[in-house]
Image (cartoon, grey):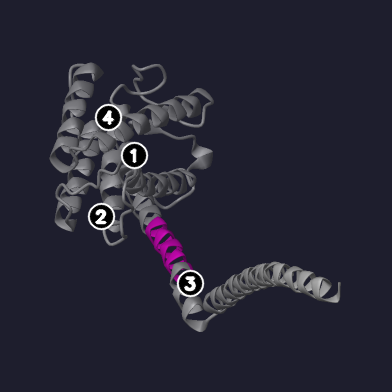
């Protein structure tokens, strides 16, 4: 019996040893996989934290701050440039208003009440500032519209052409006061042809034509309102309360001031157009 029981015991032990080895191997493999997963997760977490620290340090580094400074300085330079152009356009508009309005008054085309004749140029005090403000707005608007449309104006971009445009505009205004026609309609048609010729000679852009027509319409509407309220008056009105050739003057004036504004903005970098 002892021998039989010992043999049976040995057989059972031989069967149990492989099972224990398999169990132990499986546990060790699972633990290894678990450790690998934990180590991989820890490594990825550490890599993410290191990346965040590096990105924050780079964003706060002196080089990055120095790279961000030019954007603010460029915006400051742009604002300064706009202010300078506005002052130049205001001065040009004021001067032209003084000279041309004096011509109109001397020829008795425009009549102001005696109580508002207060300047050495025998003109109403509010006319030159209003014309200067309008010139600044129009002169800044022309290059902005060109940049928005993606059609930079490059036709005769030189100061000699701008000065000739100013001379032609003064000549058109002078002709409105000096030339004598049988009626105002003939004078209006003549000045309209001269104004379109000024646009064709010194502009030739669709934006310039559209803005010139818009300026002529709005300025004529404002003038009608002022004359209707008795601020001043025109002799021999034939277009409601004004002369029929006045929109031609406004159109040619808008084109002239627009060319001045474009030339002043020539050194400003143009933004690329995006559809």
**Left or right position of 45 against 98:** right
Residue at x 27% of width, y 29% of height: 248
Pick out the residue farthest to the right: 1
Q: Quadrant of residue 105?
A: top left
Q: Do tag 4 and tag 1 residues touch (Cβ < 8 Å)?
A: no
Pick out the residue farthest to the front: 1
Q: Which mark is residue 204?
A: none
> Which numbered mark, 4 or 3, is in the foreground of this view?
3
Neighbours of disc 1 within 10 Å: few (<14), some (14-19), many (20+): few
Q: Which residue is mark 4?
A: 248
Q: Which residue is mark 3?
A: 68
Q: Position of residue 226 (x, y in %)?
A: 49, 29
Q: Position of residue 96 (x, y in %)?
A: 32, 48
Q: Position of residue 257 (x, y in %)?
A: 30, 46
Alpha carbons under labels 3 and 1: distance apart = 28 Å
Lower position in the chain sequence, tag 2 or tag 4: 4
Alpha carbons under labels 4 and 1: distance apart = 34 Å
Lower position in the chain sequence, tag 4 or tag 1: 4
Q: Which residue is mark 1?
A: 275
Q: Is residue 120 magenta?
A: no
Quadrant of the frame with the N terminus: bottom right
Query: In this view of the protein, which residue sits in the foreground, 192 or 106?
Result: 192
> Which numbered mark, 4 or 1, is in the foreground of this view?
1
Q: Is residue 81 magenta?
A: yes
Task: Look at the numbered disc 4 and give the secondary structure of its residue.
Answer: helix
Q: Which mark is residue 263?
A: 2
What's drawn in magenta, residue-wise? 72-87
**Left or right position of 70 against 169:** right
């Amino acid at each position: 019996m002892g021998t039989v029981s010992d043999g049976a015991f040995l057989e059972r032990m031989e069967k149990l040893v492989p099972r224990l080895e398999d169990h132990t191997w499986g546990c060790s493999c699972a633990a290894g996989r678990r450790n690998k997963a934990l180590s991989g997760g820890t490594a990825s977490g550490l890599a993410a934290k290191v990346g965040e620290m590096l990105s924050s340090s780079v964003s706060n580094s002196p080089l990055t701050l120095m790279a961000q400074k030019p954007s603010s300085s460029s915006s400051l330079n742009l604002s300064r440039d706009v202010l300078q152009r506005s002052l130049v356009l205001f001065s040009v508009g004021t001067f032209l208003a003084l000279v041309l309005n004096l011509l109109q008054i001397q020829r008795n085309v425009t009549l102001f009440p005696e109580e508002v004749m207060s300047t050495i140029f025998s003109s109403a005090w509010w006319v030159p500032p209003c014309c200067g403000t309008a010139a600044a707005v129009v002169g800044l608007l022309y290059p902005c519209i060109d940049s928005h449309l993606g059609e930079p104006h490059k036709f005769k971009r030189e100061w000699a052409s701008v000065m000739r445009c100013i001379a032609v505009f003064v000549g058109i205004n002078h002709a409105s006061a000096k030339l004598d026609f049988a009626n105002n309609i003939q004078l209006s048609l003549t000045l309209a042809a001269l104004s379109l010729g000024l646009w064709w000679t010194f502009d030739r852009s669709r934006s310039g034509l559209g803005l010139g027509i818009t300026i002529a319409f709005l300025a004529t509407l404002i003038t009608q309102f002022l004359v209707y309220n008795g601020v001043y008056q025109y002799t021999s009105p034939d277009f409601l309360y004004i002369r029929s050739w006045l929109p031609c003057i406004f159109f040619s004036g808008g084109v002239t001031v627009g060319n001045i504004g474009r030339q002043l903005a020539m050194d400003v970098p143009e933004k690329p157009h995006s559809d």
